Amino acid sequence: MSNLSKRSTVYFEPDTLKALKIRAASSDVSVSELIDEAVRLLMREDQEDLADISERVNEPEMT
């Protein structure tokens, strides 16, 4: 993780946290790194969706 990273508190259901810890251990990364990656993927998908909408804004409507 970057030196510019900020700290935040995130609350998980016990089963979700357990699964995250298992995944982190088996992937040899931290839980924080897993969460950071997941959020980045989610945000990238949102950005791609918004870009697609922007590109199609002037298309004619179809009924």
Image: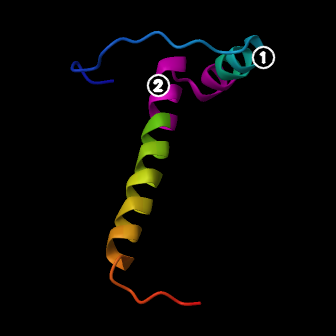
Q: Is residue 43 above or below residue 28?
A: below
Q: Nearer the viewer, residue 33 or 63?
A: 63
Q: Residue furthest right?
A: 15
Q: Position of residue 62 (x, y in %)?
A: 54, 90
Q: Residue at x 47, y 9 (%)?
A: 9
Left or right: 12, with 55 as reference point: right
Q: What colour scheme does the image use?
A: rainbow
Label 1 residue SS? helix
Among numbered discs 1 and 2, the one appearing first in the sequence:
1
Q: Which residue is mark 1?
A: 15
Q: Is residue 20 above or below residue 57?
A: above
Q: Is residue 5 left or right of residue 16?
A: left
Nearer to me, 41 or 51:
51
Residue underneath mark 2: 33
Q: Residues under labels 1 and 2: Cα distance?
A: 19 Å
Picture quarter with the N terminus: top left
Which residue is drawn at the image coordinates 28% and 20% (left, top)?
5
State yes or no: discs 1 and 2 in contact (Cβ < 8 Å): no
Neighbour tally class for label 1: few under 14, some 14-19, many 20 plus, Cα within 10 Å: few
On whether residue 31 falls in the magenta region, the answer is yes
| Amino acid type shown at disc 1 | Asp
Label 2, secondary structure: give it: helix
Of marks 1 and 2, the one in the foreground: 1
Residue shown at 48% from the left, 19% from the top: 32
Instruction: Find the magenta span and give its range.
Output: 23-38
